[in-house]
Amino acid sequence: MGNTCYTNATLQCLTYTSPLANYMLSQEPSQTCPPHRVCMLSVMQAHMTRALHHPGDVIGPLPTLAAGFHTWQQEDAHEFLLLTLKAL
């Protein structure tokens, strides 16, 4: 996937924010997503559930989360965080 340190930093910050993690683990987010469409809530829920249930795994970005960012280029973690929060 190229240079993804900005993605990993952002995802780790969001994943280990307790209120957000608790909400994502509640299974509520996926129920609010429209059917047959990519939904950031559903994508983040899947990522966070996997990361929190398997903490030994490396937290890697999902292709859907990195959409709009260019592989093999330096990107900004703050910009990625803002886009992720806006999509949520």
Image (tube, rainbow, N blue to C red):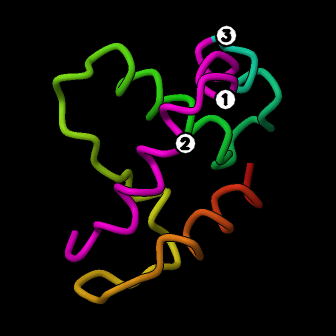
Per the rendered image, the range of residues in magenta is 1-25
Residue at 20%, 75% in the rendered image: 2
Prevailing SS of the magenta stretch: helix
Q: Amino acid at mark 2?
A: Leu
User: Where is residue 19 drawn, in percent x and y?
Assistant: 69, 23
Packing grade of label 3 (10 A; few <14, some 14-19, many >=20) is: few
Q: Amino acid at mark 3?
A: Ser
Q: Is residue 83 left or right of residue 47?
A: right
Kind of element beneath mark 2: helix
User: Where is residue 21 drawn, in percent x and y?
Assistant: 59, 24
Which residue lies under the disc numbered 2?
Answer: 14
Packing grade of label 1 (10 A; few <14, some 14-19, many >=20) is: some
Which residue lies under the disc numbered 1?
Answer: 20
For residue 6, above or below residue 61 = below
Lower sequence index among marks 2 and 3: 2
Which residue lies under the disc numbered 3?
Answer: 26
Residue at 66%, 67% in the rendered image: 83
Q: Is residue 5 left or right of residue 83?
A: left
Lower sequence index among marks 1 and 2: 2
